[in-house]
Image: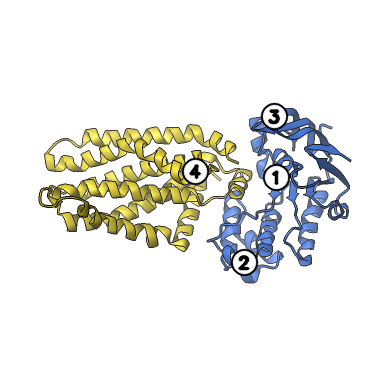
Chain colours: A blue, B yellow
């Protein structure tokens, strides 16, 4: 499994004495899209944070994009990871265009690409509107535009469809298709397994921090 | 993208947010200006000369409202926004430098408005040369901005943050207040400014080193 995009072996995560993840073993092969379903509080968001290298496992071991979790090397692969969660993370006082241009500058992407991606998600007309004056759905689309622009090798979507209408479905499909085509991978998590089934190659179930099909 | 470019982008972000929100220019600055005039009302002006109160009032107002500026600035990032920056590979020290830099710029703006008001109202003895005053204000603002940004980072996610952060900053800002006050007053007293200025420089360097050492672990711990 040395070439797996994600390879977790018996990974556990404990915080403040509370066990959030228990002995998670999973692999994500190049081009694969994995779904993780589970109820609220099952540990789905924590699992994504571990895979995103933002949290170091307290037990077990793993690699993400070839880097070992919990080591300084894991930080080097962060720019290749795209994470989208419940909160789009936009700066309320900045316009949609300023938000995406800020990410573009920090990522070293030309600002013209930022404007193009905003147009791709259908928000060119709202580019100069402050984020605080946009609906949650529009803000989520800007977050997806960020991922389109950054072209991550590993895509992590936490309840990707929440707050989005049907017109946003092709954006998520485009993100996933790109990951498949480039030999990367994607992990989608949701409390609703039926939503995951259509987009993923397989679905795992996470309950009380433990995986089980 | 190199360290300073990242810091500049972060600083510009914070200044742009302030330009839109207008909290410093619309709220903190007017109240700081009012505070300059209000403090003498708490004294017996028959026995205390206004000229003697000028500089102490100035540094007190600068400390209190400077803390507000920097702590407000450090509260502008949500956990998701911090995660975005980490995943973009932004150096935590560059992020710190950018936020502290923006806060320092805003503090200098506030202090530049309150200084002439203080001079007009109190007419203090022995005004320092503009260059010395400007240098002291830059050193004071930079130090206080770093200190408050550090305190903001240490208290991220704590329920008592709004109370705890100023309590951390105020006592640790004593070297900055002492150094600034002595440097400016040394002109009237005819003493050397070197000692107070060195105190300010050493305090700023100490805070910069603290930030460099703690930025990475603090960022990881609060993400």
Q: Toward the viewer: A87 or A65?
A: A87
Q: Toward the viewer: A70 or A22?
A: A22
First reached walking from the N terminus: tag 1 or tag 3? 3
- The reply, left or right, for residue B218 in relation to residue B44 is right
Q: Secondary structure at mark 1?
A: strand
Please tell me whether mark 4 or mark 1 is closer to you in this view. Answer: 4
The reply to whether the C-beta atoms of the residues labelled 1 and 2 are less than 8 Å apart is no
Chain letter of the residue beneath label 3 in the structure image: A
- Residue under numbered circle 3: A58
- Residue under numbered circle 2: A134
| Spatial CA span between label 1 and label 3 | 21 Å
- The reply, left or right, for residue A58 in relation to residue B92 is right
| Spatial CA span between label 1 and label 2 | 26 Å
Please tell me whether mark 1 or mark 2 is closer to you in this view. Answer: 2
Please tell me whether mark 1 or mark 3 is closer to you in this view. Answer: 3
Q: Secondary structure at mark 3?
A: loop
| Spatial CA span between label 2 and label 4 | 31 Å
- Residue under numbered circle 1: A81
Q: Please state the horizontal and vertical placement of residue B69, each as a whole percent of the image.
A: 40, 51
Q: Residues within 10 Å of mark 1 (few under 14, many from 20)?
A: many
Quarter location, residue A117 = bottom right
First reached walking from the N terminus: tag 1 or tag 2? 1
Q: Please state the horizontal and vertical placement of residue A37, each as a whole percent of the image.
A: 82, 47
Please check whether the numbered discs 2 and 3 fall on a single chain: yes
Please tell me whether mark 2 or mark 4 is closer to you in this view. Answer: 4
| Spatial CA span between label 3 and label 4 | 28 Å
The residue positioned 78% from the left and 48% from the top of the image is A189
- Residue under numbered circle 4: B160
Q: Secondary structure at mark 2?
A: loop
Please check whether the numbered discs 1 and 3 fall on a single chain: yes
Please check whether the numbered discs 3 and 4 fall on a single chain: no
Q: Please state the horizontal and vertical placement of residue B48, each as a whole percent of the image.
A: 13, 48
């Amino acid at each position: 499994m040395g070439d797996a995009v994600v390879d977790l072996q018996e990974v556990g995560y404990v915080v403040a004495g509370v066990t959030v993840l228990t002995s998670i073993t999973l692999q994500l092969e190049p081009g694969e899209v994995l779904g993780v379903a589970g109820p609220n509080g099952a540990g789905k968001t924590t699992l994504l944070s571990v895979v995103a290298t933002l949290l170091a496992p307290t037990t077990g071991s793993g690699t993400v994009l070839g880097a070992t979790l919990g080591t300084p090397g894991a930080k080097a692969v962060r720019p290749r990871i795209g994470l989208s969660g419940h909160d789009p993370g936009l700066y309320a006082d900045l316009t949609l265009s300023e938000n995406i241009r800020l990410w573009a500058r920090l990522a070293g992407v030309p600002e013209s690409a930022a404007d193009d991606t905003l147009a791709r998600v259908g928000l060119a007309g709202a580019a100069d509107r402050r984020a605080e004056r946009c609906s949650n759905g529009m803000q989520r689309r800007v977050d997806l535009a960020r991922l389109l622009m950054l072209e991550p090798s590993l895509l992590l979507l936490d309840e990707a469809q929440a707050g989005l209408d049907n017109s946003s479905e092709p954006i998520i499909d485009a993100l996933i298709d790109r990951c498949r085509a480039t030999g990367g991978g994607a992990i989608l998590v949701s409390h609703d397994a039926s939503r995951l089934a259509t987009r993923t190659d397989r679905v795992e179930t996470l309950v009380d921090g433990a995986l089980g099909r | 993208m190199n360290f300073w470019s990242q810091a500049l982008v972060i600083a510009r972000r914070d200044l742009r947010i302030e330009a839109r929100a207008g909290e410093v220019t619309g709220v903190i600055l007017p109240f700081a200006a009012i505070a300059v005039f209000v403090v003498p009302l708490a004294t017996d002006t028959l026995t205390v000369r206004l000229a003697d109160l000028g500089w102490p009032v100035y540094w007190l107002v600068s400390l209190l409202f400077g803390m507000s500026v920097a702590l407000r600035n450090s509260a502008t990032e949500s956990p998701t926004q911090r995660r975005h920056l980490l995943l973009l590979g932004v150096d935590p020290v560059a992020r710190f430098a950018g936020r502290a830099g923006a806060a320092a710029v805003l503090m200098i703006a506030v202090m530049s408005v309150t200084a002439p008001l203080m001079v007009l109202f109190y007419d203090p003895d022995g005004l320092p040369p503009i260059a010395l005053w400007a240098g002291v204000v830059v050193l004071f603002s930079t130090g206080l901005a770093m200190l408050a940004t550090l305190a903001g980072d240490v208290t991220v996610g704590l329920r008592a943050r709004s109370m705890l952060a100023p309590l951390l900053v105020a006592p640790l800002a004593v070297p900055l207040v002492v150094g600034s006050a002595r440097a400016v007053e040394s002109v009237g007293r005819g003493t050397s400014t070197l000692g107070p200025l060195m105190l300010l420089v050493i305090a700023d360097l100490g805070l910069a080193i603290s930030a460099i050492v703690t930025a990475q672990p603090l960022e990881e711990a609060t993400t």
